[in-house]
Amino acid sequence: MPELTTHLVDYGAWLVFAATLASRIGLPVPAAAFLVVAGALAAGGQISFVAALVAAVVASVIGDGAWFLAGRVYGYRILRLLCRISISPDSCVTQSETFIARWRGASLLAAKFLPGVSVVAPPMAGALGMTLPAFAFFDALAALAWAMLFLAIGALFAQQIQAVLDALSTTGVAAAVVLVALACAYLALRGWRRRAFLRSVEMSRISVDELSTLIETGSAPVVIDVRSEAGRAIDARRIPGARAIEPALIPQALAELPRNREIVLYCNCPNEASAASAARMLAKHGLTRVRPLAGGLDAWVAAGHGIESHATAAQVRAQAQEPAGQRPA
């Protein structure tokens, strides 16, 4: 048996475990590829299908569980950290907030197959208060479905994959060079996608001091919090007077936004991704005095400026049900 295949057979389940765990903690490791190879070897009776499946599920639950607990303890801060160390686009937090809040446990099933959302979903579930038993159940179910899919793909194309492994085994150093080149190409592609995203949100920012000066001098800037409802549920702080308008609702709010005043948008995500995207949207509709807040809400708080709290959904509903004369001015 070729040497490469021998190593894969000897350490197949452990390789699947290590690759899956690395992937789940946010490292750029293509765990699915390891599962496909394991599926091909299992189809040939060279490794245990069950062992590979259990290894993938256990590693996935361990990695996701660590992020879930971190999200439960540290909330939005851990999500920001995760996007900073990840090479996925910085919009991953924003994409995940509404998704997890709307579908709760069931969202973990779909998240396993969505790049970017996959790693962010567990800490987001923790930050949004999902119970540990519910998370463990849905995450294990999602890991099982994910691992079964790629193992099945490997089994389906077992002959072709085995031929590739045999070819790599007989080429020695050349095979190692090919594998390294493929890994570098994978990382380069992910890095290119990240740089492309960052270029898409490049625009002039307004500093915290500039915004504070505008407010203090009575220039009455329009301040917009573009975080999702789920994001505001995790962190209810807001810049005094800020309106909550999610990026998806920006087109509906165009008629209400003045064209003769400064409009400042902020979020709490790396590189002000959501705020910059929303600002670009407004600029395309002719509102030229629009800038994202550099550093977002965290920078505002760090500078020592005052904050307020967003009304919760329950408070908004309660106010809507009050008679007009009893509502606060």
Image (spheres, rainbow, N blue to C red):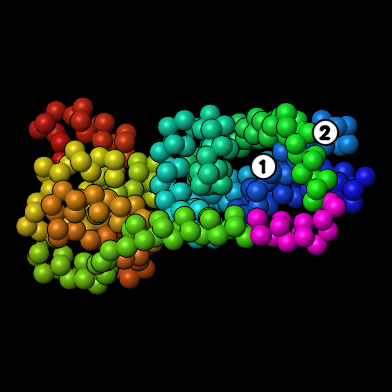
Q: Is residue 176 magenta?
A: yes
Q: How many other residues sit within 10 Å of disc 2, few (<14), some (14-19) or many (≥20)?
A: many
The amino acid at mark 2 is Ala
Question: For the view shown, which residue lies furthest in the right direction?
Answer: 1
Q: Residue 2 location in percent, x, y?
A: 90, 48
Foreground pick, 323 / 135: 135
Q: Secondary structure at mark 2?
A: helix
Q: How many other residues sit within 10 Å of disc 1, few (<14), some (14-19) or many (≥20)?
A: many
Give the residue at x 14% y 60%: 289
Which quadrant, please, contains the N terminus?
top right
Foreground pick, 227 / 42: 42
Give the residue at x 26% y 46%: 244
Mark 1 or 2 closer to N-term?
1
Give the residue at x 69% y 32%: 153
Which quadrant, please, contains the C terminus?
top left
Say which mark, if any, is on residue 197: none
Q: Is residue 120 magenta?
A: no
Which residue has dot 1 on it? 32
As measured in the structure, the alpha-carbon distance from the residue carrying label 1 to the one carrying label 2 is 15 Å
Which residue has dot 2 on it? 42
The amino acid at mark 1 is Ala
Asked whether residue 287 is in view, the answer is yes
User: Quick check: 142 above or below 179?
Assistant: above
The answer to which quarter of the image holds residue 51 is top right
Q: Residue 116 location in percent, x, y?
A: 51, 47
The answer to which quarter of the image holds residue 44 is top right
Q: Residue 324 location in percent, x, y?
A: 11, 31
Give the residue at x 66% y 31%: 149
Q: Secondary structure at mark 1?
A: helix
Asked whether residue 221 is in view, the answer is no
For the stretch drawn in magenta, what is the main secondary structure? helix
